[in-house]
Amino acid sequence: MAEPRFDELIHAPLRLRICAIAASASSVEFGELLSRLEVSKSALSKHVSQLVHVGYLEETPVTRDGRARLSLSLTPAGRTAYRGHIQALEQITGLHPQAS
C-alpha cells in the first residue's frame, strides 16, 4: 500500500491525467493519449518524457497493423507514486482523513 505523498511532478494537470489513464490499464498507446487528452504531440511528448525520466512511465515500441507505435505503462514506482499522490489529495480535500 502506498503512503500518502504529494508528488509535484505528477500533480501538473496533464501529467496527472496521463497517470490516471495509464493506471486504469496495463498500457496505453501514445496515439490514444493524444486523442483522449486533446493536446499537441509535442506537449504530450514533453510530459511523457518527464515521467519516463523519473522512472514513473515505461515506453515500449510495438508494431500493430504493420505500423510502429509507442506503448506506455506505469512502472511499479509510478503506480506507487500515483497512488500515494491520490491519497495525499484525498487527505488535503478531507475525502480520506489522515489516520491518528
Image (cartoon, rainbow, N blue to C red):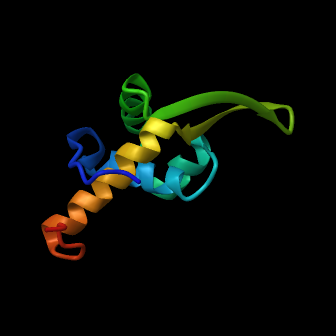
Counting from the top left corner in percent of width and height, residue 3 is at: 29, 51
Q: Residue at x 55, y 59 (%)?
A: 24
Image quarter of residue 60: top right
Residue farthest toward the bottom in the current orientation of the protein: 95
Name the side, left or right, on which 26 lies relative to 98. Answer: right
Q: Quadrant of the C terminus?
A: bottom left
Return the x and y of residue 91 as percentages of the image width and height. Answer: 18, 66
Q: Quadrant of residue 59?
A: top right
* Position above or below: 62 against 18: above
Number of labels in the image equals: 0
Q: Is residue 41 visible?
A: no
- Asked if 31 appears above or below 91 in the picture, the reply is above
Q: Nearer the viewer, residue 63 or 92?
A: 92
Which residue is found at the position 37% from the left and 35% from the top?
A: 47
From what the image shows, is residue 71 above or below residue 16?
above
* Image position, residue 99 (x, y; %): 19, 67
Q: Is residue 33 visible from the viewing direction of this image?
A: yes
Identify which residue is drawn at 26% across, 38% down: 9
Residue at 44% from the left image edge and 56% from the top image edge? 20
Q: Is residue 23 above or below residue 81?
A: below
Q: Position of residue 49 (x, y in %)?
A: 41, 27
Name the foreground residue: 35 vs 6: 6
Residue that lies at the very extreme toward the top in this rendered image: 53
